[in-house]
Amino acid sequence: MQTERRLYLTKDVSDIGLINTKKDSENQKKLSFLAIIVVIELVLGGSGRLITFGSFFSIRYILFFITLLYFILNCIFNNYTIKKNMFYFDIILFFYVFAFAIANGIVSGYEIADVIKSSQGYLYLLIYFPISLLIDNKQKSKQIFRLIINCAVVLALVSITIFVIYYFDSTKYNVFTPILDKLDYGYIAYRGGLPTVFLKTSPFIAISFVLLLVHYINLKKERNLVNTLKLSILLFGIIVTMSMGIWIGTSVGILLTIMLSRGKNKIFGLTIVILLMGFAYYLASDYISVSITNRLSSNDSSFIIKFDQFFMLVKNWLNKLVLGNGFGIEITFLTELGKRTMINFELFWLQLLVNMGLIGFIIYLKIFIKSIYYSFKKNNAINFKDSLHIKSLIIGLIVLVIISSVNPFLNNPIGIGYLVIVMNTISNYWKDNGLNENKIIKEIF
């Protein structure tokens, strides 16, 4: 039943408001193969071109269209009815502004190819609908949670392996670089005389470290040798990226984890973090010290480029403050490293303002704020383990937001994919824990 500016949901409403008339209790606990493949590819698939079919079709695009087709077919043949829920309105509203920004770019005379290239990543937000159908309860959400962590551990092992080989034999640059470039999987380089390994989905290593750390600190059964090893692997995977965005994001995530832990767990958490950091510093003290010095230096190439980007992006945003310049705008600026022309930038939040203006920025940011708000609002109404699940995902989201301040992840499937999982999980917990025949939850748009 819907009233003015209000939506009432009953227990029959699924994650995105899908009413299933043929529920199977066994299937409610079983995670579909399609959901598993989508998540594995998201974390381990680099930029999505690990497997390609021709010049335009990649495995990520194919999985994206398959999941959308799965959703459409289920709506047609399995008696599903689309209803609104807490994120439905926000997603639709975002795509209205998104469509305007595309039209704005075309009308402004930007190259069509540039308009498409700078906007296409946001389309991945549509996967929220099929994901909500594939992962439609908290049991499945927990399985996805573990799958992300385990995939990130594998990714960290890949990073560490490349780093170790490259560290002891710099000639292997000519072996790894062609492979990484061909797969668009990441890059290796020397910075300040030290190797760095940054893979496209490296943010998942930082996110997963925080996800696991929250449970490790607050649940005794999670404090085992396997998880200790996983945390160590993830931590070293973070270090070898030599990315200040990932390092700062992880540091904030660790701080929030300790702050939000209960009672004695704060002391335990602080002790564990000190031990892990001490162990890492013992093994790689010179590397860490030199890396920090180099990355904070005003002579660092990344710093120079982002510094000059900042002022040019602000200038272009202020020219069209409210509605933005549209997708496809090309910005040229001079740096100490030479002239650079770009349509996609490393400072994501500023690029969002440039492309979609203050309106687009506020609407997109609202999704994040809403996720954080409802995760804490529901926190007291569910059991401790479930609250940890949501709490860790939100801390991971904050880590991602920080990383995206200096690296563009929230305008492409890598960051948006994690955002969708967080949104979906929150919706599942609201449905599974908060709704029954005698109680309805009011959602204010």
Image: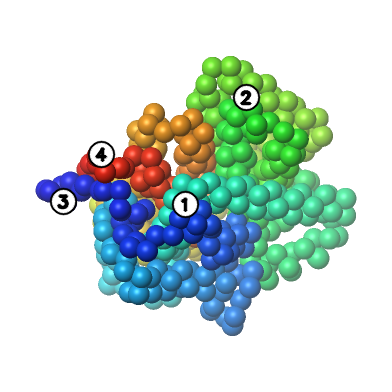
State the residue at coordinates (35%, 46%). Answer: 431
Dot 3: few (<14), some (14–19), or many (≥20) neighbours within 10 Å? Answer: few
Q: Which residue is mark 4?
A: 439
322 left or right of 55?
left
Taking depth in this image into account, of 418 and 300 the one nearest to the observer is 418
- Secondary element under disc 3, as helix, strand or loop, is strand
Residue 186 placement (x, y as % from top left): 66, 59
- List the residue tagged with mark 3: 2
Q: Number of numbered discs present?
A: 4
Q: CA distance from mark 1 to mark 3?
A: 27 Å
User: Percent from the top left, x then y, of residue 264?
Assistant: 58, 17
Mark 2: few/some/many CA within 10 Å (<14, 14-19, 20+): many
Disc 2 residue type (three-letter): Gly
| Furthest-right residue in this view | 168
Q: The residue under label 3 is which amino acid type?
A: Gln
Name the element at disc 4: loop
Instruction: Tell me where residue 327 sits by quadrant.
Output: bottom left
Residue 293: x, y in percent?
Answer: 69, 35
Relative to 425, is 154 on the left or the right? right
CB within 8 Å, label 4 to label 1: no
Q: Which residue is at a point 65% across and 31% down the rendered structure image?
A: 221
Residue 215 visible in the picture: yes
Q: Mark 4: few, some, or many residues within 10 Å (few <14, many ≥20)?
A: few
Q: Secondary structure at mark 1?
A: helix
Tag 1 and tag 2, C-beta contact below 8 Å: no
Against 386, residue 404 (above or below) is below
Q: How far apart are the two marked residues, 1 and 2, measured between alpha carbons? A: 26 Å
Question: Which residue is identified by label 2?
Answer: 269
Q: Label 3 to label 2, Cα distance in Å?
A: 45 Å
> Which mark is on residue 421?
1
Q: Is residue 122 at least partly visible in the picture?
A: no
